[in-house]
Amino acid sequence: TRRTLGPAAILAILWMVFVVSAALLAPLLLPSTTETIDGLAKQPPSLQHPFGGDKIGKDVFSLTVNGGRVSLLVGFVAVGVGLLVGGSLGIMAGYFRGKTDAVLSVIFDTFLAIPAVLLALALVAAFDPADPNQIDPQRRMWVLAFALGMVSIPILGRIARASTLAVADREFVLASRAMGAKPIRIMWREVLPNVLPALLSIGLLGMGVAIVAEGGLALLGASVSSPSTPWGAVIAATRGELNANRPWVVFGPSLFIFLTVLTLNYLGDVIRRRFDVRESVL
């Protein structure tokens, strides 16, 4: 029987469609992230402003929805870099084995031994060492995305290596070798399609991790500033409101992070189940 997605998976997909669509349409439908609204400063949530206003009168709902564009882009680019580089190196390590596997495994283990947040923070500082008052938001966004991508390379490389080791001795791979196919063709045509479901499953989880990691970097002052700020940066900028008994300012972006990360994790699990990715590989 053909497997159906189920109501939970449909809800997860609908949430992602909502977040992506809202982020894209926010500049047309919501107040600007630099606009202050008279009388909104420090106001609690209302029907017109669901997440209330911050201390200077900005609409927190507009900040949150607009921030989704940056948060999702950072997560997507980070995982894309990890899949491209880490996946390629992992497949090479699992297919060629021997010295290639030994060298790449040492590289993966070395990067995994470094705390991820510290590594990302060091990379951001190295590639964008601008004065805090002169940071280019666009440059910082791409630097942050690629820094988080570098952090994800060893994890996805390990997953690709383990999956390739399980596939490299299968009959169809041995048949391609016997027919004289070159290693690159075998890895592309035979190995990659069987490794890709595991990588996509972990990649969705990694996207959620990247979104959360951006929030951690925002608290350390290494995230993206206005005009469009990711969810973590919105929380970092408004966390002082918790001491002023205005928790709703932080609640909105925190809720978006929670639901988005939960959705990405669940969709990753759906891919694993539908493509029968082995737990031992993951």
Image (cartoon, grey):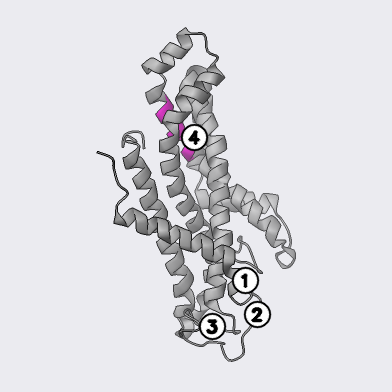
Q: Which residue is drawn at 47% across and 59% down?
A: 17
Which is more N-terminal, label 1 or label 3? 1
Rendered view: 265 above or below 241: above
Q: Do the residues labelled 2 and 4 touch (CB within 8 Å)?
A: no
Mark 1 secondary-structure assignment: helix
| Residue 245 appearing in the image | yes
The residue wearing badge 1 is: 28
Cβ atoms at labels 4 and 1 below 8 Å apart: no
What secondary structure characterizes most of the magenta part? helix
Q: Name the residue under label 4.
A: 157
In the picture, measured across the screen, residue 65 lies left or right of residue 258, that is right
| Residue at 30% in and 47% down | 4
Which residue does the numbered mark 3 point to in the structure image?
A: 53
Magenta segment boundaries in residue numbering: 155-164
Q: Name the residue under label 2.
A: 35
Between the C-alphas of marks 2 and 4, the distance is 44 Å
How many angstroms separate mark 4 from mark 1 (CA)? 40 Å
Nearer the camera: disc 4 or disc 1: 1
154 left or right of 136?
left
Q: Which amino acid does label 4 sit on?
A: Gly
Q: Distance between the residues labelled 3 and 1?
A: 20 Å
Of discs 2 and 4, which sits in the foreground? 2
Name of the residue lying farthest toward the front: 1
Q: Where is residue 178 in the image (x, y as percent from the top left)?
A: 46, 8
Q: How far apart are marks 2 and 1 (CA)?
A: 14 Å
